[in-house]
Image (cartoon, helix red, strand yellow):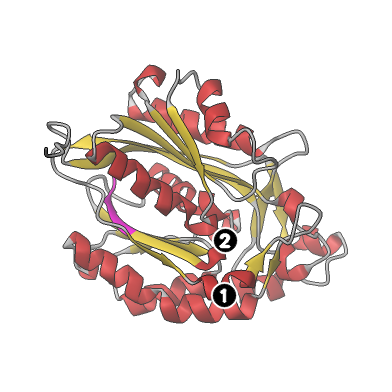
Amino acid sequence: MSIQLAAGRPGARILAFGHYQPDNVVTNDDLAARGVETNDEWIRSRVGIAERRLASADESMEDLAVAAGGKALAASGLAADEIDLVIVATCTAETQVPNASATVAFRLGIKAPGAFDVNAACAGFAYALSAASDAIRAGSARNVLVVGSEKFSPWIDWTDRTTCIIFADGAGAAVVTGADVPEIGPVVWGSDGENADKIKVEDRNSFLHQDGQAVFRWATTALHPVALEACRRAGVAPSELAAFVPHQANLRIIRGIAKKLNAPNAVIAEDIVNAGNTSAASIPMALSRMIERGDIPSGEPALIIGFGAGLTYAAQVIQIP
């Protein structure tokens, strides 16, 4: 016997993005005023962040996901009952059971979808987007809601300047559907488990720890070949890219990878300046905000690459909806 793909579903495309940021803006000066041994110039020069958003105590990671997912769903033109798979990418869930995706789907009025979470840390959205695209191409789903959502604030030691200046809260989402002509390119992904302990949380009674220098060296040396390979597999030259949207980890990392990529016509996402590092939320949130501002024209190719704890990475070329 032979396995047949669903008729008319050779590819997938993104219909719309959405994002959500909490109201509470925390500037670098605010952190210094709280007693953190730092200042605005020190933070800007090392990671490029001017401010970040933090959720309130009664605002959960799922709340952020619902807000971003609802915005993407509304922009897609699809009804909730047309979504048959929900994937939430997160590494900051307060509990492992139940998963966030089933809760988010229920709160958005999506009835009985497939629902699972992905924890690939800062590469989570790129992993989840690939899973959504593959599910559609295989005929396992028709329309998929993909959400990257993080509430880092409870997992951060707010006296540790190596982490508290960097991480933030937020969510971004995309709605994915079938397409006769593929608009989501092949994923290039992998991991370096030998160095997985460079970013870790020991247990629920611990805070996030990061070996910043080791991660910086890895990101600035190992990832640009991954980005180039994603372009090659998609058949898109770097010079053809309208945008480069990497995970918003550190402004120096972003600019370092962009320089090696050599995409002269691409708008480079630097959402980190006003959003901080929101891990799995950073790529869809940056894309949503860039599209909302009119920074990227519809129909143009963009390269995304996520990377972080694991050490995991994933890149693919997408067409802007």
Is residue 114 shown above or below 117? Answer: above
Lateral position of residue 111 relative to residue 249, left or right = left
| Residue 159 visible in image | yes
Residue at horizontal 66 percent and vertical 75 percent from the top: 211
The local secondary structure at tag 2 comes to helix
Q: Residue 192, image x and y in percent?
A: 49, 72
Percent x, y of residue 13: 26, 41
Question: Which residue type carries mark 2?
Answer: Val
In screen coordinates, is 89 left or right of 301? Answer: right
From the top left corner, tell me how far across and down residue 217 is, in percent: 53, 82
- The magenta span reads 316-321
Residue visible at 47% across and 79% down in the picture: 220
Which residue matches tag 2?
Answer: 273
Q: Is residue 303 visible?
A: no
302 w.r.t. 86: above or below? below
Tag 1 residue: 195
Graded by Cα atoms within 10 Å as few (under 14), some (14 to 19) or many (20 or more), the crowding at tag 1 reads some
Tell me the residue at 52%/49% (across/down): 281
Q: CA distance from mark 2 to mark 1?
A: 27 Å
Q: Is residue 205 magenta?
A: no
Quarter of the picture containing the N terminus is top left
Foreground: 214 or 159? Answer: 214
Q: Dividing the image into 4 quarters, which one contains the C terminus? A: top left
**Residue at figure coordinates x 55%, y 77% from the top left:** 216
